[in-house]
Amino acid sequence: MSEKDLKDKDTIPSVDEEKRDFLFVTTAGLAVAGGAVTVFSMVDTMNPAKDVLALSTTEVDLSPIEEGQSLTVMWRGKPIFIRHRSEGEISDASNVSVGELKHMASDESRVKNPKWLVVVGVCTHLGCVPLGQKIGDNKGEFGGWFCPCHGSHYDTSGRIRKGPAPLNLEVPPYEFVTDDIIKIG
């Protein structure tokens, strides 16, 4: 290099180290923020959709259902039978010897409040919907539900008493939010 080149080199201003550090920190910060947003959006796509969450629980107001009446609501595409049981129905269900049942379960283990029975209205034999919810329906020999497809009879606690069904009507997960409102799911 010539002497002139060396003089020009000395006159070139030195790099401003503060600006360089600022640019480095800013670039690194933006890269971390962009990565965090990307990771968050990817994880968020794995959450269930709002329509699925809406179907996961159902709240039901029990106040309009009078004693002896039933209501059918849908939950996760299945009919849910809700029955406001009379004192006679509660007594009949409680006085059954658990040992004589095909699928042994006490009435107390199937209800949270003796007045209200909540079961999935699908026969455990082949998935039919039993009769017994409407006025005039055949309720079977035990006053609960009757599946005419193959002759399964359920009692007022939703327990299988006669016929080919192997299990009791399923009790869905539910809880009483208030005395008159239940949340299924």
Image (spheres, helix red, strand yellow):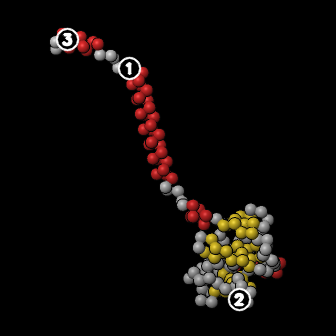
Badge 3 marks a residue whose secondary structure is helix
Q: Which residue is mark 3?
A: 4
Q: Nearer the viewer, residue 151 or 48?
A: 48
Q: Nearer the viewer, residue 75 or 49?
A: 49
Q: Which residue is mark 2?
A: 137
Residue visible at 76% across and 71% down in the picture: 62
Q: Which residue is mark 1?
A: 16
Mark 3 crowdedness (10 Å alpha carbons): few <14, some 14-19, many ≥20: few
The type of residue carrying mark 2 is Asp
Q: Nearer the viewer, mark 2 or mark 3?
A: 3
Badge 3 vs badge 1, beta-carbon distance below 8 Å: no
Q: Where does the image place residue 67, in percent across and percent down from the top left?
A: 81, 78
Between the residue at mark 2 and the residue at mark 3, the CA separation in whole angstroms equals 110 Å
Between the residue at mark 3 and the residue at mark 1, the CA separation in whole angstroms equals 24 Å
Q: In the picture provided, is 44 more to the left or to the right than 170?
A: left
Question: Could one spot residue 117 in this view of the protein?
Answer: yes
